[in-house]
């Protein structure tokens, strides 16, 4: 069974204080790993897709990296508007189609 | 454009009411999804439509009835719901719903803003 574990559950940062969120996964053949950002009461916003170990992707203050067992979402010099829940999800080659297995999310709060 | 739209934004209904949630995308995607999300939990898959045919039903109670009138539209018909069905209902779409083993690099799912449903 595919499993995704995100840590920490919650993270409080001061504005400008860089940090990383972790997503550990167990999957029978990784097809893709996805990062989403979700604001309260809204739908998840797609951020990145990573397909193979060693891959990195960047968007503004965010950088996602992937190894064979985990992914990190690095946040550089965060701003209060980066406060949100960050969800990690995986797709496996052996499961049905584009089904996603989600982690429980990391709730990030950035204080001014 | 990666926009998925959902209406209504909020819905309050009694247990005897019949209502519908609507979802639309104009990205040419051929797979559409319904998810249910409870507070502080990740989205849970309910239904998947691929090329306008129901591909997956995650053992959802029959009081939820999905419909895909065409490749751009997805409806969720609600009838005789229970208070525990109150949640954020999310629609998503992806270019395809590739089967196991198929090479499909464009399989990101894009979510709509959701409908906040309250059942009294």
Image (spheres, rainbow, N blue to C red):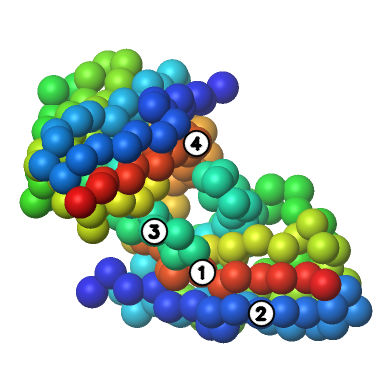
Query: Which mark is nearer the camera, 4 or 3?
Result: 3
Compute the Cα span from label 1 to label 2. 11 Å
| Vertical side of A67 occupied by A62: above or below | below
Q: Chain of mark 2?
A: B
Q: Quadrant of the N terminus of chain B?
A: bottom left
| Vertical side of A112 occupied by B62: above or below | below
The disc placed on residue B11 is: 2
Q: Chain of mark 3?
A: A
Compute the Cα span from label 1 to label 3. 11 Å
Between discs 1 and 2, the one toward the N terminus:
2
Residue B111 x %, y %: 41, 62
Q: Is residue B107 visible?
A: no
Viewer-nearest residue: B105 or A35: A35
Per the image, the residue denoted by label 3 is: A39
Compute the Cα span from label 1 to label 4. 18 Å
Q: Residue at x 41, y 35 (%)?
A: A10
Q: Are marks 4 and 3 on the same chain?
A: yes
Compute the Cα span from label 3 to label 2. 19 Å
Mark 1: few, some, or many residues within 10 Å (few <14, many ≥20)? many
Secondary element type, mark 2? strand
Furthest residue in direction right, as rendered: B16
Compute the Cα span from label 4 to label 3. 14 Å
Per the image, the residue denoted by label 1 is: B114
Secondary element type, mark 4? loop
Q: Is residue A73 visible?
A: yes
């Amino acid at each position: 069974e595919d499993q995704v574990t995100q840590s920490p559950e919650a993270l409080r940062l001061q504005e400008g204080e860089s940090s990383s969120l972790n997503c550990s996964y167990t999957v029978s053949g990784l097809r893709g790993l996805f990062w989403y950002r979700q604001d309260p009461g809204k739908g998840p916003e797609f951020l990145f897709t990573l397909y193979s170990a060693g891959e990195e992707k960047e968007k503004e203050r965010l950088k996602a990296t992937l190894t064979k067992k985990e992914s990190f979402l690095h946040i550089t010099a965060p701003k209060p508007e980066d406060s949100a829940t960050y969800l990690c999800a995986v797709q496996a080659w052996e499961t049905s189609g584009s089904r996603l297995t989600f982690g429980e999310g990391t709730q990030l709060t950035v204080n001014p | 454009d990666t926009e998925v739209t959902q209406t209504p934004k909020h819905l309050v209904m009694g247990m005897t009411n019949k209502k519908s949630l609507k979802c639309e995308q104009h990205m040419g995607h051929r797979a559409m999804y319904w998810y249910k999300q409870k507070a502080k939990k990740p989205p849970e898959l309910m239904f998947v439509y691929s090329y306008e045919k129901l591909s997956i039903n995650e053992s959802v109670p029959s009081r939820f009835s999905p419909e895909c009138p065409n490749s751009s539209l997805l409806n969720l018909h609600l009838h005789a719901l229970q208070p525990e069905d109150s949640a954020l209902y999310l629609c998503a779409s992806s270019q395809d719903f590739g089967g196991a083993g198929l090479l499909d690099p464009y399989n990101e799912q894009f979510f709509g803003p959701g409908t906040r449903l309250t059942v009294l």
